[in-house]
Image (cartoon, helix red, strand yellow):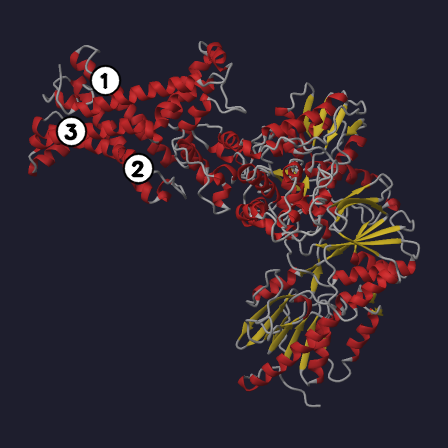
Amino acid sequence: MHFNLFVVPFTAGMLILVILLTVRYIKWLSDLEAGNRNEIGGNLFTIKTLYAIREVFMESLLHRKVFKTNPLLGYMHMSLAFGWFLLIVVGKLETFFYTGKFANEFYYPVFFRFFEPTPHKSSLLLAFNALMDFVLLVVLSGIVIAILRRFRPRIAGMKKITKHSPGDRLALIALWLIFPLRLLSESATAGYSGNGSFMTQSVGNFMALFLPVHQLAIVFWWMYSISLGLFMVSIPFSRYMHIPTEILLIFLRNWGIKTKDHFSGFSEIEIQSCSRCGICIDTCQMNSQGKNSTTQMVYFLRDYRYNQLRPDLTDNCLLCGRCNEACPVGIDLTQHRLLQRKKKEFELPSGFKYLPVNQSVEKTDVIYFAGCMSHLSPVISRSMEKIFKTAKISYLFLDKNGSVCCGRPLKISGQFEAAQKLVASNRQQIIASGAKILVTSCPICYKSFKEDYHLNIRVLHHSEYLLELMLQKKLALHPSGKKVVYHDPCELGRGSDIYIQPRMLLSHFMELETIDQEKENALCCGGSLGNLSINPEERNAIQMATAGYLNSVDPEIIATSCPMCKKSIAQFSATPVKDIAELVVANLEALSESQKSLKHHKVGQTIEI
Amino acid sequence: MAINSQHIVIIGGGPAGLEAASCLGTAGYRVTVLEKEKQTGGKLLIWDKLFPEFRNSDKVLNHLSNGFKTNPPQILTNAEVVSVIPENGQHRINLRDGQAFQADTVLITTGFKLYNAEKKEEYGYQIYENVITSFDLEKQLKTGNPIRIEAGLTPRRIAFIHCVGSRDIKSGNIYCSRTCCITGVKQAIEIKRRLSDAEVFNFYMDLRMFGQNFEELYIEAQQKWGVTFIRGRVSEIAENKDNSLQLKAEDTLSGRPIKMSFDLVVLLAGMVPEPRTVEIGKSAGLEFTSGNFLAGLDSHISQNETNTPGIFIAGTCREPLSVAETLTDARAATVKMISWLRENETSHKKPLIKRDND
Amino acid sequence: MKDWGYSILKGRQIDFENNDFSIAEYITKHEPSFRWCIGCGSCTATCSAARLTDFNPRKLKLLIQRGEIKGLADEIAKCMLCGKCQLVCPRGINTRNVIQNIKRALNTCHAL
């Protein structure tokens, strides 16, 4: 039996941690949405579990995604996480080879060098000794970066670093102390017993020159144990809760669980998995362009955990989804913001009695729904009508004289119930038409039709539909050589994964330029309906920056496929901003123009593309 | 007449530039006017009749050229200025074609540009056939031909939309362009004069009849010509199958939305600074107003002086003004210029005009 | 709401001394752009709900500012929050947040 009184803080801390974690995990898992448990059961013994294990290794230990964002920051996280993991695993193996048995006191490997001061003889154990020193060195290097970064964020390539709460700071200090104290404890022991390796022995010998290492060692071991214990206890009350919880998250996610329209136990697990790395602060345009660095998701999740959510944390967000893409933990951040907006205080039950019910609608195969915003960019619906005509498709322009809103603007403002009433009204009309295809020009409507309408017909955004028409040779487009850059609307790109279709269409008849921040990383135009409380200066700053960014590749035309993006960018762009449907029509008309004889040439009708 | 050796360059040969040139010429100065177009006169050349008394724009143009009887200025057309650089107490004026002028003092009278109404896409300018701007209408009036819409028909119902690109944060211009209100009234009357059966409507937010006889013209439009004024800003225009236009506005005084069809819609587009003015202003280190017009030194007592000594501004390059106000402003600027030249007379004697032909 | 803003029981005047300005104050505090309105009516003109029912965001705002809030809850519940008014507003008023704050004010400080 190996024992010394100093193991008590560590052991107690460990026990408290295990108890608290067990209680919480049981609570969260029992709060999963109905059906989730079946999902887990169905996926438990499939390849998905292996994927989860691989993901835990790649993300929780190696922090591959953080590496991608920033190598130094990735190294910092990896050295701490993977380094610590190795210290535990290698330490355990070392005791196995030393004692020949696997079972021992669970604190024994942690304080191994204290309990076994006699220097090793076998080369295997000496190698282990050196390996442990090396891993400790790696972890210490990570700590050095972490400390430097706290004071100068730019060292790790970040402009802004997360500001922490007092509880977090205590945990952080405990964490920072653990490894230097381990070094001091092991070195002091090595200083009098000679059981150290290249680093601990050198430091120990040096300390022995002028310090009473024998007496000091026990003090350091105490401090080491206390810092470990303190850290363990602080885990459930600090951001470090993310370390154990992320592993659980990865498994559940791989088994197909998502946060949907209700807050569930899984949502809680997602929120607790945030490591507060702060990557979402830099990626957020509210910060980089709007000069607001207090409402990013890291703060939202932090204040949610501590029950201190302010209204601006839920409201002042574009819901653009850029942070979702950047989040190394893969939390569905915007969905969480959305769920917190869902509040009774916005619901007024009396509304929408005026909505049309059981309307009779003309029978048709194809419905075109321009969307509210498109009515303020009439060139879009006009272009679509010309295209339908050219492709000889009979269609019904459902909202020609204005529309009942699709419901998504209400939903993303937190009024889920009210939104349902609008959904029901439009849905009835769409179904009554007997249409097989629903085409819309508005990415907001598109996402709503796809996710909230439960229609058993094809729902297409016009960028998808136009590509289809072109591939079916119903539209003859001809290369024009014009240089175009495409702006991904948030709701269409990150929101609905439509990245390829508009690009395939455009590159068929124009020179499509690539730009660094596009597709998943595209900038938000700033026009977003997602943000309720943005002030006009911030909105303008974002619109201006995005317009400037798109202009930076010197395009002849900026293309997009959202009426709102078009308006936002055009406000600040010297280069013309056109909807993808407009460009298609211009190409069709340029061709028919050139086919006509010059006699019929009409001044003022020349189309350049 | 004794000619003062000091040299004045006026950038822009519109009403402000020409009026200033004649005043300074009469006062005995050597003046060079640089006009970027092939003809002087500025936007007066486009305009048919001027409010409020429907005077022919030619009359004002004649007045301006009559001013050159004594000591006429040297006028260079097709002379596009790109920069004005202060140099040894003087100013070097660089042209696009490489020519350069040296001046003791410079007057910038580069005028305004019409707001690009295409930017307000909800109004459908350049999308719908029968949506035109006040400029387009003026050009049509100047031809003297009967007013016709695109299909060659006579319009029966015509709408004027006020504040297009003015008082509108969405188009980036929060200022009032001042002259569009009265232009709307003037053009409405001109349409009624030619098409007495037509119904003419003006959609406005506020009618700002600030000038002499402006309010009287507004009353005349109501009393004599039966022009209807609806207080409501148009939110959007849709095109009907027959190419007529459907307007949406709120008739705010009755408190109800209004939907009306029109054969012709005229957008009263506002004034914005010429991009060229901004370039020149930047090169000379001048300051700008929030609307990006050139800023005077003081809004009460020295509107024509700038923060760069020796550079003066007049006319619509510094704020939206009517023709009458522009001419007054140009004359005011010349007084300030002359006193500045007198104060700085003894400091240097340089060759009058230095031309670098390279 | 036929009589909204045209109450027959009260006097015809806006009783400025006795009217309830708490909602106007609440909104102005949380969305200052509420006060920037010049009453041009673009919002009502473009409003998706106003096409289908008697709903007038411009007048609504004006009456709140005059302290005339009778029937406000039923009125504001007609808004679909589609955001067209925000796009056309020449003063750049954050109209959607104004609407949200009216709702919040009604549900938190008033049981109307």
Q: Which chain carries label 3?
A: A
A147 relative to C40 in the view: left or right: left
Q: Looking at the image, tell me whether mark 2 or mark 1 is earlier in sequence order.
A: 1
The answer to whether B290 is drawn above or below residue A198 in the figure is below
Label 3 belongs to which residue? Answer: A222
The answer to whether A514 is drawn above or below residue A108 in the figure is below
Relative depth, front residue between A432 and A560 = A432
Label 1 belongs to which residue? Answer: A92
Of the 4 image quadrants, the one containing the C terminus of chain C is top right
Q: Mark 1 lies on which chain?
A: A
Label 3, label 2: how far apart the Cα atoms are: 21 Å
Dot 3 amino acid type: Trp
At x 66%, y 79%, the residue is B334
Q: Is mark 2 on a helix, strand or loop?
A: helix
Label 1, label 3: how far apart the Cα atoms are: 21 Å
Q: Looking at the image, tell me whether mark 3 or mark 2 is earlier in sequence order.
A: 2
A449 relative to A264 in the view: left or right: right
Of the 4 image quadrants, the one containing the N terminus of chain C is top right
Q: Which chain carries label 2?
A: A
Task: Choose top left, top right, bottom left or bottom right for residue B290.
Answer: bottom right
At x 70%, y 82%, the residue is B25
Q: Are marks 2 and 1 in contact (CB under 8 Å)?
A: no
Q: Position of residue B288 (x, y in %)?
A: 58, 64
Q: Classify mark 3: residues with Cα within 10 Å, few (<14), some (14-19) or many (20+).
A: many
Relative depth, front residue between A215 and C46 = C46
The dot on residue A169 is 2
